[in-house]
Image (cartoon, grey):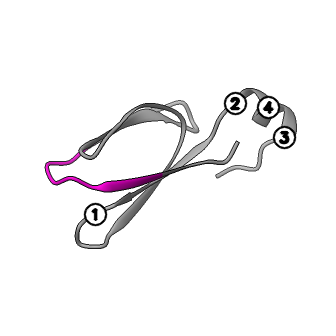
């Protein structure tokens, strides 16, 4: 996660998404935009403007935290 100026943070969003799986493993993503999130699918755009898509057959829990 890069340190951004207050002006950048005023006009842009940053979300931290933590995916927690049944076996206790965790994955963390930092996204500018969340297109869709549910128990089997995560779609969005990361800090560098690249598309992120994560699909899973087994459901996972998730936690969304907005930084700015």
Say whether disc 4 or disc 1 marks the residue closer to the N-terminus. Answer: 4
Q: Secondary structure at mark 3?
A: loop
Q: Secondary structure at mark 1?
A: loop
Q: Secondary structure at mark 4?
A: helix
Q: Give the CA distance from mark 3 to mark 4.
A: 9 Å
Q: Is residue 8 left or right of residue 29?
A: right
| Residue of label 4 | 10
Say whether disc 3 or disc 2 marks the residue closer to the N-terminus. Answer: 3
Q: Which residues are magenta?
A: 55-63
Say whether disc 2 or disc 1 marks the residue closer to the N-terminus. Answer: 2
Look at the numbered discs 1 and 3 and tell me whether their residues touch, using CB distance below 8 Å: no
| Residue at 20% over, 48% down | 56
| Residue at 84% over, 40% down | 5
Where 19 falls versus 39 (above or below)? below
| Residue of label 1 | 21
Q: Secondary structure at mark 2?
A: loop
Residue 65: where, in percent of width, then height? 57, 50
Say whether disc 3 or disc 4 marks the residue closer to the N-terminus. Answer: 3
| Residue of label 3 | 5
Residue 58: where, in percent of width, then height? 16, 54
| Residue at 30% over, 73% down | 24
Q: Is residue 25 visible?
A: yes
Where 58 falls versus 11 (above or below)? below
Residue 10: where, in percent of width, then height? 79, 31
Q: Is residue 52 visible?
A: no
Among the 4 quarters of the image, the one containing residue 32: top right
Residue at the far bottom in the pictured view: 24
Residue at the far right in the pictured view: 6
| Residue at 27% over, 46% down | 39
| Residue of label 2 | 12
Q: Is residue 56 left or right of residue 30?
A: left
């Amino acid at each position: 996660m890069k340190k951004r100026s207050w002006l950048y943070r005023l006009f842009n969003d940053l979300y931290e998404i933590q995916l927690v799986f049944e076996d206790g493993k965790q994955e963390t993503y930092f996204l500018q935009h969340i297109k869709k999130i549910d128990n089997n699918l995560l779609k969005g755009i990361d800090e560098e403007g690249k598309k992120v898509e994560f699909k899973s057959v087994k459901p996972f829990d998730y936690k969304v935290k907005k930084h700015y």
